[in-house]
Image (cartoon, rainbow, N blue to C red):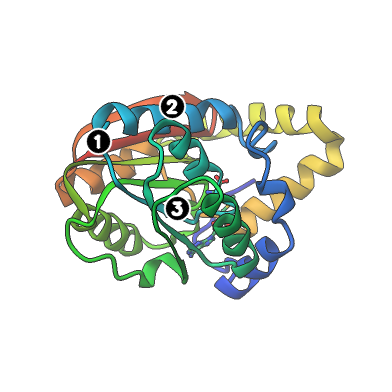
Amino acid sequence: MSITYTGKATNSEIEARFDQDVARFSNMDTGQATTLDAPLTMELCTSAALQVTPGATELLDIGCGAGNYTLKMLSKIPNLNCTLNDLSLPMLSKAEERVSAQTSGTVKTIQMDMRNLELGNEQYDIVLAAATLHHLRAEEEWRLMFSKIFKALKPGGSFWISDLITHDSSELNILFEQKYGEYIESLGGPEYKQKVFDYISYEDTPRSINFQFRIMAECGFRNLEVLHKNLCFAAFGGVK
Ligand SMILES: C[S@@+](CC[C@H](N)C(=O)[O-])C[C@H]1O[C@@H](n2cnc3c(N)ncnc32)[C@H](O)[C@@H]1O
């Protein structure tokens, strides 16, 4: 899996792939098999959000997929008003169906590239973005997203990311890629590993925690914290 920043999948290609993958993202217990510690990072991001704003009423889930993170959040803070965003309509429809069954709050869906979201000011207590920001490409796109999210949070609200990451050290990138490859191979053999590495190479542009923290800090976030890290996956976030 070598990460390049040019010649990547287009949004239409990404949308089409996720349109076909709703079932895989609808399992609360396993989350995604290719994501290390997926259930733990979901638990930690939602616990952190609960701890920071126990009285939260408004949640935004960016790249929500089939809604796993929102459902986990609702298990800790019931009846939140939920805003769900995803590029893929089948994902969003599944999320809407599952989330509506679990909250008496409002459920708003926005099918849109996250870069185009108009989120307004001080709307949300909690913003979650799991396994999705790695679709952002140039640094300016990350800055745009983080500044929108900062503006959209109420003061004291929090933003939690769980994602594939890179490292600033190329040596550690090699080490963690090798170890992640061994893990994927243990799940499905060498062909499966190649398949996963090929789609990561084509589709994803992950960034390091340091890169994301730097931009978050520049946008005004404080109390930046790493909740968990295992090889090239991490959960982290901050408070407005
Ligand atoms: C790996 S899934 C993760 C879903 C969910 N957050 C979870 O953890 O179960 C990534 C999701 O991000 C969505 N996505 C990809 N690019 C996006 C974009 N530019 N804007 C909004 N959503 C996007 C995909 O359609 C997909 O549903």
Residue named by callout 1: 55
Q: Decide if ligand 1 comes within 8 Å of the CB at mark 2.
A: no
In this view, the mark in front (1 or 3): 1
* Residue at 44%, 61% in the rendered image: 137
* Residue at 31%, 59% in the rendered image: 145
Task: Say which element carries label 2.
Answer: helix
Q: How crowded is mark 1: few (under 14 residues within 10 Å), some or many (20 or more)?
A: few
Report whether 2 appears left or right of 19.
left
Q: Is residue 184 above or below residue 137?
A: above
Q: Decide if ligand 1 comes within 8 Å of the CB at mark 3.
A: no
Amino acid at dot 2 = Leu
- Alpha carbon separation for disc pair 1 and 3: 27 Å
- Where is residue 70 shown, x and y percent of the image? 47, 45
Residue named by callout 2: 44
In this view, the mark in front (2 or 1): 1
Q: In which quarter of the image is the C terminus?
A: top left
Q: Do the residues labelled 3 and 2 touch (CB within 8 Å)?
A: no
- Alpha carbon separation for disc pair 3 and 2: 18 Å
If you read the primary sequence from the N terminus, does the residue marked by circle 1 or circle 3 appear first? 1
- Where is residue 192 shown, x and y percent of the image? 82, 42
Task: Say which element carries label 3.
Answer: helix
Q: How crowded is mark 3: few (under 14 residues within 10 Å), some or many (20 or more)?
A: many
If you read the primary sequence from the N terminus, does the residue marked by circle 3 or circle 2 appear first? 2
Nearer to the camera, 195 or 46: 46
Q: How crowded is mark 2: few (under 14 residues within 10 Å), some or many (20 or more)?
A: some
- Count of labels in the image: 3
**Figure quadrant, ligand 1:** bottom right
- Where is residue 106 shown, x and y percent of the image? 40, 58
In this view, the mark in front (3 or 2): 2
- Where is residue 104 shown, x and y percent of the image? 43, 50
Residue named by callout 3: 133
